[in-house]
Amino acid sequence: MVSLTNAELLAALTGRRRCAPSAEPPGLRFAFYGRMSTSSFQDVQTSRAWQRAVSDELIEGVGAVVVEFFDVGVSRRWSWADRPEAAALLAAAADPRREFDAVVVGECERAFHGDQFREVVSRLNTLGVEVWLPEAGGPVELGSPVHEALMVLLGAQAQSEVARVRQRVLAAMRAQAGLKGRFLGGRPPYGYRLADGGRHPNPVHGRWVRRVQVLVSDPATAPWVRWMFAERARGRTVASLARELNERGVPCPSGADPDRNAHRSG
């Protein structure tokens, strides 16, 4: 059995790390902040490492990182108060006995969204803590017209990226479902059932012999879906349709697919 020190246990539980003390005075003492949104599709160690490497390059010759704050599994749209590690950083900055003089961020777009930057930097500056960004080439000066323009641009770019990714993903999902009948997760809609769609089209998934599932018309429920649409188009109310379906003994969605609706009684 491997025993952990208190510092190692804290890092394992929170993602926070305290760097080994240097024999030489490090100059400015920095707190590093980084973030990644998902741990399912990204490697935590790799993401932390490249963001930390960018930060170390920025502050080389000026100081050293003495403590790390790294959020995992939180969206950039979350406020800093709602991110565990970011909130811990703000709390540590407000402590008169804090162990750092400045904060260095691995990437602006990962740390801030929209107007968060101005709020966070103003708060830290009020506490006497500088914020260093790779995009600014050093400490950010809120009173500088150049830095003000840069922050507006970066904030808009971060918002644009979120919107662009959302649009791309939704458009791709619609195309896969509409053109190929691909099943993209969740419970199949009423009127459909799942069927094997063959080898996964993605070469990587295909090499792992993964297969896709597609939505096909369910012979038991699809006729009722067509009937509901036809009756609704004639002007009938939803309530009258529900009453007639109940009178005819037509199973509801959870009753028609009890295996995927175990949380419902019918």
Image (tube, grey):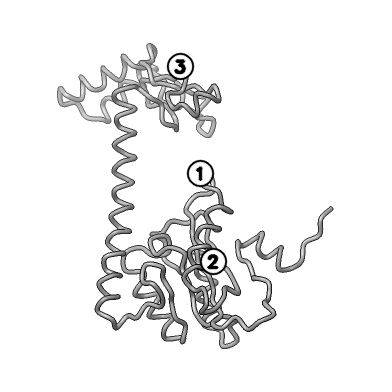
Q: Where is mark 2, residue-wise?
A: 85
C-alpha span from label 2 to label 1 = 20 Å
Direction from residue 69 to residue 179 in the image, left or right: left
Badge 2: residue crowd in 10 Å (few <14, some 14–19, many ≥20): many
Dot 3 falls on a residue whose secondary structure is strand
From this view, report whether residue 39 is shown above or below residue 20.
above
Please, what is the three-letter code of the amino acid marked with disc 3? Gly
Whole-percent x, y for residue 53 in the image: 52, 62
Q: Residue at x 50, y 44 (%)?
A: 41
Direction from residue 63 to residue 155 in the image, left or right: left
Whole-percent x, y for residue 65 in the image: 57, 73
Q: Which mark is residue 177?
A: none
From this view, report whether residue 160 is shown above or below residue 241.
below
Q: Which mark is residue 41?
A: 1
Q: Are marks 2 and 1 in contact (CB under 8 Å)?
A: no
Q: Residue at x 67, y 77 (%)?
A: 22
User: Which one is earlier in the sequence, the residue at label 2 or at label 1?
Assistant: 1
User: Which one is earlier in the sequence, the residue at label 3 or at label 1?
Assistant: 1
Q: Residue at x 63, y 84 (%)?
A: 25
Q: Are marks 2 and 3 in contact (CB under 8 Å)?
A: no
Q: Are marks 3 and 1 in contact (CB under 8 Å)?
A: no
Please, what is the three-letter code of the amino acid marked with disc 2? Glu
